[in-house]
Image (tube, rainbow, N blue to C red):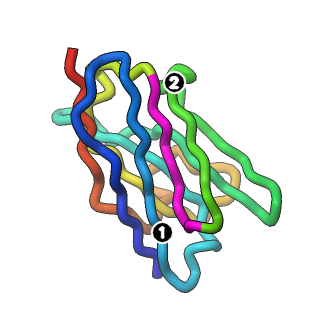
Amino acid sequence: QVQLVESGGGLVQAGGSLRLSCAASGRTFSSYSMGWFRQAPGKEREFVAAVTWSGSVTATYYGNIVKGRFTSSRDNAKNTMYLQMNSLKPEDTAVYYCAASPYRRTGLGAPGNYEHWGQGTQVTVSS
């Protein structure tokens, strides 16, 4: 079982930055790739980024929507994944979720390929 808890959301002005954290726990959490999704009111859930690893090799994938402004990373010692969000825009306003997937390289952009989800954290960007 994998448990995921997001934190770090809040209100920020356009052009500002936020760093989201996803703390993972569970006896088999290391077997999963980790991803970020977001969902705005009236919109479908969309892929933001994902991190997968095998030993010392880490691969990071990004959705086209972030336009190079976001960076996803992991801290193995803390069992935590981060999403650094820079140059935030009002259209980035959404609930951001982290999730765990058994896929290791492909298929990480599809919400249906994730088995565990956090509760989400609200990000609001004001103009």
**Quadrant assignment for the C terminus:** top left
* Residue denoted by label 2: 69
User: Going 82% across and 60% down the picture, which residue do you hit?
Assistant: 56
User: Going 72% across and 59% down the picture, which residue do you hit?
Assistant: 53
Above or below, 44 against 82 in this view is above
Q: Amino acid at mark 1?
A: Ala
Question: At which x and y percent is residue 114?
Answer: 47, 60
Question: At which x and y percent is residue 80?
Answer: 52, 61
Pick the residue in front: 63 or 22.
22
- Marks 2/1: CA–CA distance: 24 Å
Which portion, as a residue range, is magenta?
78-86
Mark 2 Cα-neighbour bin, 10 Å: few <14, some 14–19, many ≥20 = few
Pick the residue in front: 86 or 110.
86
Question: At which x and y percent is residue 109?
Answer: 53, 44
Question: At which x and y percent is residue 38?
Answer: 35, 41
Magenta span main SS = strand
- Residue 24 - label: 1
